[in-house]
Amino acid sequence: MFEPQHHTIALGSETLADFLSSSREHYLNHVRNDSGKAKEWTIVMGNEAGDLDTLASSIAFAWLRTKILDQPSIPLLQMNRDDLELRAENLHALSLAGISRPKDQLFFITDVIDFHPFPSHKFALVDHNRLSSTFSPEEQPLVVAIVDHHVDENLYGDTAEPRIIIPSGSCASHITTLLDTVEIPPELATLLLSAILIDTDGLKPGGKAIDVDRKAAEFLASKSTFASSESALHTTETASSTSLLELVFIKSLSEELSSRKNDVSHLGPRDLLRRDYKQYDFVLPWHAAKPTIRAGLSTVPVKLEEWAADGNLETKGEAWMKERGLHVLGVLTSYRSATKGKRKREMAWIIRVDFPPTEGFDFEALTERLWNGLQADPVLQLKEHKKFAHGTLEPMLFPQLQVQIYMQDPHATRKVIAPVLKAIMEAQM
């Protein structure tokens, strides 16, 4: 069983930032020297969207495996180094955790892009539970651990320890549960706390937070850098979830992170599409050739009319699809109405009919299956978009694209939509 015993870590002068910098330097030296030592490392990897939850969870789990379990591990960010700038909330949380030069201190996928095959074969997955086909080491990949809160894809049951795939508001809460018997650096507690707060709307009652999130936040608050003041520490030691919400630093941190996350006014359409993006490969058992298609889902916190009108959805969407090799792109928007402030969501779908995954591919069957499957799903509750039902301009201007746009249930996030898409694509009939 994966049960860390109680430890008091004497970090000495080593900070969380030192740990990350040192891990990156040592691992890359092993890779470049081709000594075989890189294979002794475990790659701790979050999902490719690179949000704060995935960032904090991968850093914390790598720290736990290295410092507590004595298993050298390094957190890998599935993004380009420059993409870090797309998420101001991440940069803020990292700075609060003392990681002031994240582009130099963190390990990015671009750091090993020139090494083929991938230099390591052991992976720990956090905030997702399927290893991407992108990672093809020389040896058979081995998934040694999973900590996640998405839908369980029922993989790696014989190799992953722990294998924790349980619903929660934040994956960081499950990571925190594994850390509650060890003495963790205050900077790490602050980073995890930030992830939980941003994923649960500040632990708002009636929101995404459940018991595991509230308990994790209480534990982290008392260990964080904010608890250095005597009054904050005293309060959090005996805090209920209600009193935790009343703490000034909890309120201000939640508001600051949310404000930075929601301010995307400086980002253009391409940046919005790639800022919060996940990718999936599906084998189509219903098609005679059983081809594999690639689909992407971009979550955008701005309504379509404000950034994607007048053909921007089609032109920028198609360019992004070509860049990522996509056959299908779903753009999931989230915003609040200007009148009553209610949460609203749109979804725009684009299929490239000029990019067949195999010779003689039946795009008509694909489009019919996708539109009908989405419209029939009882959770999504789709309604045709009043302004952009079949695109932002006349469909005849984009004959290479099939476009469909809907309004949807405001509670159905990508975490809900991705399994629906998978079920539609991978259904036998």
Image: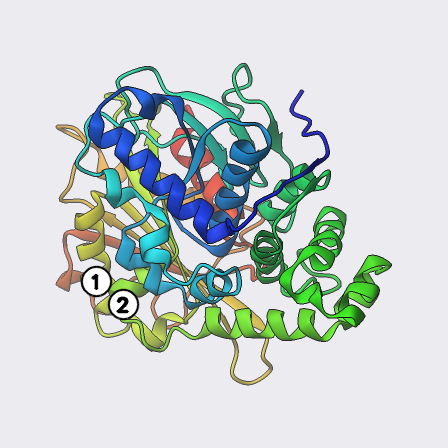
Task: Please tell me which residue is depicted at 47% across the width and 68% down the height of the picture.
Answer: 261
Front residue of this view, candidates 26 and 120? 26
Question: In the figure, 300 relative to 380: above or below?
Answer: below
Look at label 1 and name its amino acid: Lys
**Which of 226/203 is in front?**
226
**Other-residue count near label 1 (Cα within 10 Å), few / some / many at <14 / 14–19 / ≥20:** some
Q: In this view, does 30 lie above or below 395?
A: above
Image quadrant occupied by the N terminus? top right
Snapshot quadrant of residue 237:
bottom right
Label 2 or label 1, whichever comes before in sequence order:
2
The front one of 298 and 235 is 235
The quadrant holding residue 246 is bottom right
State the residue at coordinates (42%, 68%): 88
User: Measured from the top left, where is residue 355 in percent x and y?
Assistant: 15, 41
2 and 1 marks in contact (CB < 8 Å): yes
Can you say which quadrant of the picture contains the C terminus?
A: top left
Answer above or below: position of 70 versus 279: above
Q: Can residue 328 be seen in this view?
A: yes
Tell me: 281 left or right of 401.
Answer: right
Q: Residue lying furthest bottom in this view?
A: 339
Q: How many marks?
A: 2
Q: Name the residue under label 2.
A: 269
> Percent from the top left, x then y, of residue 348?
36, 58
Q: Which residue is drawn at 61% across and 69% down?
A: 254
The residue located at (76%, 49%) in the rendering is 211
Q: Residue beneath label 1, please?
A: 316
The three-letter code of the residue at mark 2 reads Pro
Q: Is mark 1 on a helix, strand or loop?
A: helix
Q: For mark 2, does the 10 Å Cα neighbourhood hold few (<14), some (14 to 19), or many (20 or more) residues?
A: some
Q: Which of 81 and 292 is in front in this view?
A: 81
